[in-house]
């Protein structure tokens, strides 16, 4: 039930639910306590569901983010999963969230830039097919479509390299990015032809941040209001 809610109408609990779902094969008392806390949160926020208030212009925005090795120091240090980074992203159509995800990356990132770049690449796997579907549906019902779809990318202040790397020509790469070139550089061939803009976004305005880690009360409430209305 919680997985259904987090994937359909309550993106604000996606991180917490998916973090608990990792332990369904061997739950402990602290996982039961976490589930009860999620239940109390839902009970106390029954009036804060997802509100769709579309804008007049049909445009697509994607907010990918990553938390570099965020579980390290909070879980068993002998467990290799604790050093995996978490990808989180949300895709909005006309300012309405239509797809969001929170999941651990499949391999261990060696830097914050790599984790952010992997998140950017993974979000494109959902973004590109969605753009094709939007174009097809819009043309079928004679709706105007903005050709300049915008991709908002949040990069930590010391890793602007991930943004720079995403803007490079498809055949170019840096010495530090060669080891993950084949698997994650593929999306750069689509950025230009699809007229997608890679833009810097402030950390405080990064909607994907709510899917990557547990936030304190103020930033969580702010991002929740921006995301869910």
Image: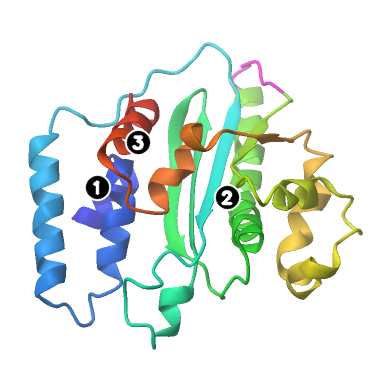
Query: Where is residue 225 shown, x and y percent of the image?
Result: 33, 27
Magenta residue check for 142: yes
Horizontally, is 94 left or right of 75 in the view? Answer: right
> Residue 126 appears at what percent x and percent y?
57, 50
Between disc 2 and disc 3, the foreground one is 3
Residue 112 on the magenta segment: no
Q: Earlier in the sequence, mark 1 or mark 2?
A: 1
Name the residue tied to disc 1: 5
Q: Is residue 40 left or right of residue 226?
A: left
Label the magenta part by its dominant secondary structure.
loop
Among the two numbered marks 2 and 3 on one chain, the one whose residue lies closer to the N terminus:
2
Q: From this viewpoint, which residue is outermost toward the front?
A: 158
Q: Which residue is mark 3?
A: 219
Residue 9 vs residue 219, the one in the foreground: 219
Q: Which residue is mark 2?
A: 126
Of 2 and 161, nearer the camera is: 161
Give the side of residue 145 with respect to residue 63, left or right: right
Q: Are marks 1 and 2 in contact (CB under 8 Å)?
A: no
Residue 64, image x, y percentages? 55, 46
Quarter holding the N terminus?
bottom left
Image quadrant in which you'd find residue 179: bottom right
When asked about the image quadrant of residue 218, the answer is top left
Foreground mark, 1 or 3? 3
CA gap, disc 1 and disc 2: 20 Å
């Amino acid at each position: 039930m919680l997985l259904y809610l987090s994937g359909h109408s309550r993106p604000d609990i996606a991180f917490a639910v998916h973090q608990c779902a990792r332990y369904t094969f061997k739950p402990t008392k602290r996982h039961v306590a976490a589930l009860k806390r999620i239940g109390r949160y839902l009970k106390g926020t029954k009036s804060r569901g997802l509100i769709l208030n579309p804008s007049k212009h049909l445009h697509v925005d994607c907010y990918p983010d990553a938390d570099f090795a965020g579980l390290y120091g909070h879980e068993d240090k002998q467990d290799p999963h604790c050093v995996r980074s978490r990808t989180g992203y949300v895709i909005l159509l006309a300012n309405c969230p239509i797809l969001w995800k929170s999941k651990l990356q499949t391999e261990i990132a060696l830097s914050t830039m790599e984790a952010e770049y992997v998140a950017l690449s993974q979000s494109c796997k959902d973004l590109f097919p969605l753009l094709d579907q939007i174009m097809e549906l819009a043309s079928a019902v004679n709706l105007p479509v903005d050709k300049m779809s915008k991709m908002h990318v949040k990069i930590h202040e010391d890793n602007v390299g991930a943004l720079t790397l995403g803007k490079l020509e498809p055949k170019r790469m840096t010495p530090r990015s060669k080891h993950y070139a084949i698997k994650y550089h593929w999306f750069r061939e689509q950025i230009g032809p699809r007229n997608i803009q890679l833009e810097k976004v402030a950390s405080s305005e990064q909607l994907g941040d709510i899917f990557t880690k547990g936030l304190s009360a103020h930033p969580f409430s702010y991002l929740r209001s921006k995301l869910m209305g």
